[in-house]
Image (tube, rainbow, N blue to C red):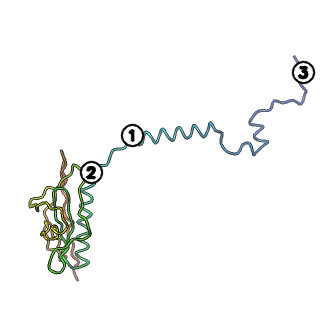
Amino acid sequence: MPCLPANFAPTMESERRARDPARSAGFSLVEVLVTLSITALASALIVATARPADPLRTEGERLTHALEQMQSQARISGTPMGMVLEPQGYAIVAWRDGAWSNVGTQRHTLAPGVRIRWAVSSPETDSAAALSQLAPDLIIDPLGHSTLEPVVLESKDREVSVSAPSVKMDRAP
């Protein structure tokens, strides 16, 4: 067995890194790959367990938002606002110059599988000109005199009832 010098001490990797700070900066390739693998696995599990969006609930929220916007617009402008309902969608109209006219250029089409069920339904139309000639199924009066029946959105096995927001009138003291 060879004799080692008296001042010999085995150099460990940690001691070498402690003496050379440039070598200890950063991560090794293995550490980076392990971190990326764990992150990818966690992301895949999250995506796999996430539930898809419910189209009935989404359309109910959109319709509620549209009714709230109509109420705000009616109160701000002082003109009645209306909604023409069709089984596959709806359009917002406003009372201008003695007739109902479209607000915006399009009607909102519901998601596939979702339909509107309304007690009094208008005949289905495809043209914007014919749509503007129809009386709306829902009317929101700026003075708060509107009484609106809830609109029912239905899918194959469920339904959601959407009511117009309650009208709160500001009273002078």
Q: Is residue 75 left or right of residue 26?
A: left
In the rendered image, residue 20, in percent from the top left (x then y), is placed at 78, 43
Q: Name the residue type under label 2.
A: Pro
Q: Nearer the viewer, residue 161 or 36?
A: 36
**Mark with earlier residue (1, 3):** 3
**Residue 3's mark?**
3
In this view, the residue in front, 93 or 123, is 123
Q: Which mark is residue 55?
A: 2
Mark 1 against mark 3, which lies toward the viewer? 1
The answer to whether 125 is drawn above or below residue 145 in the figure is above
**Along the line of sight, which residue is nearer the eye, 23 or 172?**
23
- Give the labeled residue for mark 1: 48
Mark 3: few/some/many CA within 10 Å (<14, 14-19, 20+): few
Vertically, is 132 above or below 58? below
Secondary structure type for disc 2: helix
Q: Is residue 37 left or right of residue 58?
A: right
Tag 1 secondary structure: helix
Residue 79 found in image quarter:
bottom left
Disc nearer the start of the sequence (3/2): 3
Q: Residue furthest left?
A: 120
Distance of mark 2 from mark 1, alpha carbons? 19 Å
**Label 1, label 3: how far apart the Cα atoms are:** 63 Å
View extreme (top): residue: 1
Q: Helix, strand or loop at disc 3? A: loop
Asked whether the beta carbons under mark 1 and mark 3 sit within 8 Å of each other, the answer is no
Across and down, in percent, residue 111 comes to 25, 53
